Image (spheres, rainbow, N blue to C red):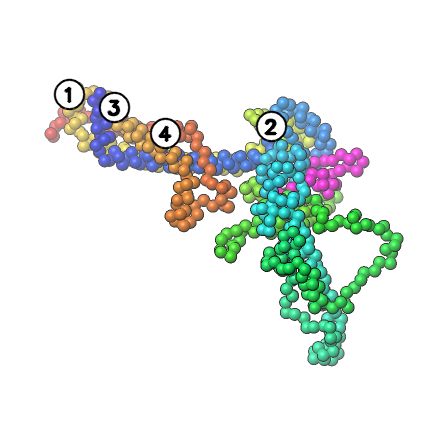
Amino acid sequence: MYKLILSWRYLRTRFIALASIISVTLGVATLIVVNSVMSGFVDQMKSRLHGILSDVEISAPLLGQISHPELFVEEVKRVVGGDLEALTAVVRTPAMLTAKFHDRPMTQQVILMGIDDETFGRVTDFSPYLQNELKRQRFSFELETGGYKDLLENGDDGWANRRRWVEFERFKERLNRGYDDLFEAVENQVEPSLESTGAQSAVADQPKFLSPLPDQPPQLPPMIDDETDRQFAGDGSPRDIAPKDQIADLAISSTATQFPASLEISPFDPHSASRPQISRDEMFDPLKQQHTGIILGVMLSKRKSFDADNSLIDVYMIRPGEDVQIMVPSVGAHAQAVMENCTVVDFYSSNMHEYDSMFAFMPLSQLQKLRGMVDPLTGMRAVSTIQIKLKPGVDLSEVRDRLLHAFPVEYYGYDINTWLDTQAPLLSAVQMELKILNLLLFMIIAVAGFGILATFYMIVVEKTKDIGILKALGAPGSGVMSIFLSYGLSLGMVGTGAGIAMGLLFAYNINQIADVVEWMTGREVFDPSIYYFSEIPVLISPWMVFSVALGAVAIAVLASVLPAMRAARLHPVEALRYE
């Protein structure tokens, strides 16, 4: 009984014991908070990677193909058996994406994926990553009339934006043609005079309808859409609204003042009567029709900029409704580059930069035809990848091994991997980082343990007389030793308990604490545009909390062992000799 009484007295009355408790508390709280946040990041990253990728993927070599996919799929179903939940066929190929931004071509390499709009969403979490609200509910490659609120500055109507874009492109084309005609007229009528009579006579002899060339192109006339009453200037940005009835007059007057009507050339085709006649209904009308729909990774278009208030904003270089050009290699021994015009119908945002800056999606059947993956005799369509989703709880590695035995690589040449195999380098690096971080944080608690060790040595020296009296009264060495061990255990338990409470409280309210810090410092602590999370993710594992608590208490007890052994070995005569 005297052991517990002395331990409680030392714990309650000594300030140095409070310092040891605080050091243990801070170490435990720090370890719990950091582990919870890191675990939250890792869990969110795994969840998003798993949502992007299928459980198991069977893919042909680069630019290769899987012929007779229907027969191949049936064999896959037989091998996987009851573990199969869904599968889909995909065509994946490198491609070049070309779009225009302020009349400047913008070309970027992408990974183009041809997907089936009915089955692809069953294998991966594709629909939740789409930006259009309507496509999340009912996926298609058609341009929607609404749901683009976060992508279009002038409303959420994709077709209205397409009509504005087409009209603006047509106007620029007319403007460029007018300038070409004007330059050609100047060359044909002014240059000869310059050669024969000199510059002054050339200017005097030029036709009256030709005015000197302006230093800059004239201001573009406003382009108004009937539905949204938006005006576009030369840079494509929305400006002030002009009256609708002035549009035609402005366009005609601007062109007429710069380009004379006498320079217009009417094309003539002498064989037009013998050519097949195409009705207006059969012609492609970009105002009412779209090209093949394509969904782009959001980072292919989104850039950071500043608004008038110097606030950071997102600027989209390509918007839904606009057309882009895709160039892909065809299959076969003599591969060629083939091109296709596509209409952007939506953006894909998984918040994983590697995928959002590289992926583009288009209909599977269209990409198969474009690359020549359709047999002209049998109509059989080849694919490049089979993606498989398994039922929850199924061992992915075991299913992968079954598929490897069924389709040996030395015969088929196919790559068969799970999503964990594909992302193994990234996941291994994150796990290694988490382990090293835990080791470094445990060293903080170890520092507190050395403080306890030094404290106990001081107590043993200070209480030498008391230890001698106890032993003279008959206290055994084990009893004296247990006093200091109980003291160390008490320090560890009190500090660990306080650290767990503080760490859990901090972790549960970390986003509110971050808001307070931002308000006090005026600087953003957690930028969602960098980390791609709307708030700081936290995942608290009970096993982690128990491990930290057990480790902290063990360090405190181990730090008290050596001083306790020294106190137990003290002889009462030596302890009381100088008293």
Label 3 – label 1 distance at C-alpha = 16 Å
558 vs 520, nearest the viewer: 520
Local packing at callout 1 (Cα closer than 10 Å; few below 14, some 14-19, many 20+) is few
Residue at position x 38%, y 48% in the image: 520
- Residue 190: image quadrant is bottom right
Asked whether 376 falls inside the magenta stretch, the response is yes
Residue 188 falls left or right of residue 344: right
| Label drawn at residue 16 | none
Upstream in sequence: badge 4 or badge 1: 1
Picture residue at 17% right of the left edge, 23% below the top: 470
Q: Nearer the viewer, residue 509 or 467?
A: 509
Q: Is disc 1 placed on a helix, strand or loop?
A: loop
Q: Nearer the viewer, residue 80 or 149?
A: 149
Q: Estimate how packed mark 2 is, as few (under 14), some (14 to 19) or many (20 or more) residues with alpha carbons within 10 Å.
A: many
Q: Please say if 109 is above or below 434.
A: below
- List the residue tagged with mark 4: 549
Q: Residue at x 62, y 57 (%)?
A: 231
Tell me the mark number nearer the camera, choosing from 1 and 2: 2
**What residue is shown with label 3?**
482
Query: Sequence order check: which comes first, mark 3 or mark 2?
Result: 2
Whichever of callouts 1 and 2 sits on the residue coming sooner in the sequence is 2
Q: Which residues are magenta?
A: 359-385
Residue that numbered label 2 is attached to: 390
Q: Amino acid at mark 1?
A: Leu
Disc nearest the viewer among 4 and 1? 4
